[in-house]
Image: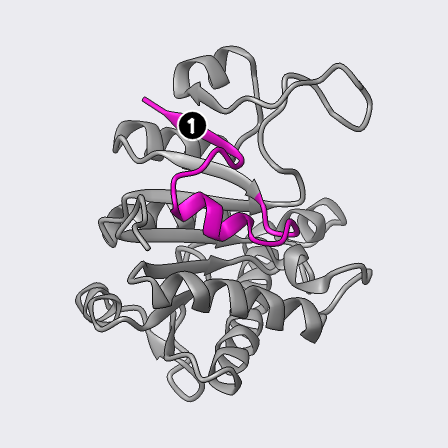
Amino acid sequence: MPTAYKRILLKLSGEALMGDGAYGIDQGVVSRIVAEVAEISRLGVEVGIVIGGGNIFRGMAGAASGMDRATADYMGMMATIMNAMALGDAMRVAGVAARVQSALNVEQVVEPYIRNKAIRYLEEGKIVIFAAGTGNPFFTTDTAAALRGTEMEAEIVLKATKVDGIYSADPKKDSAATRFSKISFDEAISRNLQVMDATAFALCRDQKLPIKVFSIFKPGALLRVVKGEDEGTLVHI
């Protein structure tokens, strides 16, 4: 089955792993995500994944409550390592070859991020899960996704969300809201559409790395995206 992309970078939020729960990890949701990733991997798509940590700890929230921002962000990075380990283990159980690499040095549990090794893993057909964001405070996992996507020479960043694309207005509040099939970076900026944080968005735009926003909760959406079907919203130059 032909696919539109050979190598992708999938951005998964920590919240995506908790399903309907208030926090933590829903193993049923994780298993479903693993099954969908495994499906596109079997088609020959090379998959890198950047995982967030918002289901366990969010740095911005910690900073807002009076915690030192850098400390809060490092705690958030460690939360992403836990999520990456859970996702990697779920892949092991499903018989999917995966490797976890961390931007923070915690070699007792996962290997450090090494670009050339990560690229080799992708070429071997292994899923590579990138943990700990960029390894620096004050940068979000959206920025990590843009950075790793660029470093891995991915063809596109797939931003998995709870909404099936970018709309002209909030579809929950405005029944007349329509989904964009495609939108340019410049138009997204002029409309002030919050696709990703500003640093991540600017990096993707400058590197001419397109972004596809889609719903990870919509069964089969990931497969339709990599097949190039009209699923989600493509942000392009």
Q: Residue at x 40, y 60 (%)?
A: 40
Q: Tag 1, which secondary structure?
A: strand
Name the residue tied to disc 1: 235
Residue at 34% in and 79% down: 111
Q: Quadrant of the N terminus?
A: bottom left
Considering depth in this image, is 11 or 164 the residue closer to the camera?
Answer: 164
Left or right side of 162 for 101: left
Does residue 138 appear anywhere in the picture?
A: no
Task: Please say whether residue 48 is visible from this viewpoint.
Answer: yes
- Check if residue 96 falls in the magenta segment: no
Q: Residue furthest front?
A: 1
Tell me what residue is drawn at x 55 percent, y 12 percent: 191
Query: How many numbered tags mark residues here?
Result: 1
Q: How is the image coloured?
A: one colour
Which stretch is magenta?
Answer: 215-237
Direction from residue 11 to residue 32 in the image, left or right: right
Residue 208 image position (x, y, % from top left): 27, 30
Instruction: Residue 215 in the image: state x and y as whole percent.
Output: 60, 44
Task: Residue 159 in the image: state x and y as whole percent.
Answer: 50, 44
- Left or right: residue 121 compared with residue 82: left
Q: Which one is in front, 44 or 164?
A: 44
The residue lying toward the viewer, choosing from 93 and 201, is 93
In the image: residue 134, left or right of residue 71: left
Q: Tell me where residue 214 appears, x and y as whole percent.
A: 55, 41
Relative to 207, say whether 44 is above or below. Answer: below
- Amino acid type at image mark 1: Val
Q: Quadrant of the C terminus?
A: top left
Query: Which is more toward the observer, 57 or 156?
Result: 156
In this view, 55 is above or below 159:
below
Residue 223 vertical placement versus 88 (above, below): above
Residue 234 inside the magenta-drawn segment:
yes
